[in-house]
Amino acid sequence: MKVINNIKELRKCLARYRKEGLTVGLVPTMGALHEGHASLVRRSVEENDVTVVSIFLNPTQFNDPKDLERYPRTLEADCRLLEACKADIAFAPTVKEIYPEPDTRQFSYPPTDSVMEGAMRPGHFNGVCQIVSKLFMYVEPDRAYFGEKDYQQIAVIRRMVEDLGFKLEIVPCPVVRQSDGLALSSRNSLLSAEERVIAANIYRVMKESCSLGLSVQQTHDYVVEEINKIDGLEVQYFSIVDGDSLADVSSWDDAPSIVGCITVFCGTKPIRLIDHIRYK
Ligand code: PAF
């Protein structure tokens, strides 16, 4: 696996592959890689001749400097995992390389980027669009792989791809969970052993809510109340939305696909965990 730090070299290397007619898959990451990322990389390796994994802790998508500061940084271990998954290129640039000047571009794709995470973390999706659009321009991938764990992020990126006319396929990949149901996330490494156990209740309660035959409002209230009853967990929001537009629904008949998206504070630090469940 090649580790490349600058855009010029990345482009040169990819141009050689393209000349040979090879297809390219891109897996954008912020590092602190785990089995969830590995599943994206393996899928890309299966479906493309060349797989590029970017490792870049993108400052423009963090609205809270403390969150950025404590985000885990594990480049050596990340590269070992990528070697094992048979990725071809790890692209690990510096902040200066990506943003030699501040990025002043503004992206706006309501309601996908204005509700839920968009409302709680102003500027977050603008930063995601800034970095992902740059990566798409540098790599020009045939396919780009994103984890469904960040369900809303995929909806926003789809709108950006449409808007800017990128010629590539977005491949959403299922959430990878621990055996107790906790969705894998780089932020899990910030939880204590006890908090990890408590955090598994988030998915347990959402899953339970699928089979109770409740209305949308009752399902919402059930999930929020049951999770809030658990010491160490506090729901920030739980929204039951159209799986494509992310607009709120009030009845199960309102959309062909419906998901519940949740954000929960866990523990005393606290760590913010996100997850979702598909109702239909
Ligand atoms: O999902 C993430 O890890 C990030 O938001 C992404 C897509 C790599 C952009 O920095």
Image (cartoon, rainbow, N blue to C red):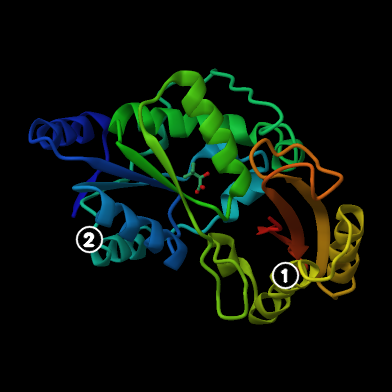
Looking at the rendered image, the disc whose residue lies closer to the viewer, 1 or 2, is 1
In the displayed structure image, the side of residue 150 where residue 48 appears, left or right: left
Residue sitting farthest toward the left: 20
Name the residue located 68 percent from the left edge and 80 percent from the top edge. Answer: 197
Which is nearer the eye, 39 or 269? 39
Q: Secondary structure at mark 2?
A: loop
Q: Residue at x 73, y 42 (%)?
A: 255
Q: Is residue 150 left or right of residue 231?
A: left
- Is the residue at mark 1 in contact range of ligand 1, meaning its CB lies under 8 Å from it? no
Q: Tell me the tag on residue 207.
A: 1
- Verify CB contact (< 8 Å) between mark 1 and mark 2: no
Residues packed near mark 1 inside 10 Å, few (<14), some (14 to 19) or many (20 plus):
some
Q: Provide residue 80's location: percent of width, then percent of height.
A: 28, 65
Dot 1 falls on a residue whose secondary structure is helix
Any atom of ligand 1 within 8 Å of the CB at mark 2? Answer: no
Examine the rendering and report whether any part of residue 151 can be seen: yes
Where, quadrant-wise, is the N terminus in this rendering? bottom left
Mark 2 lies on residue: 86
Is residue 60 shown to the viewer in this render? no
Q: Quadrant of residue 63?
A: top right
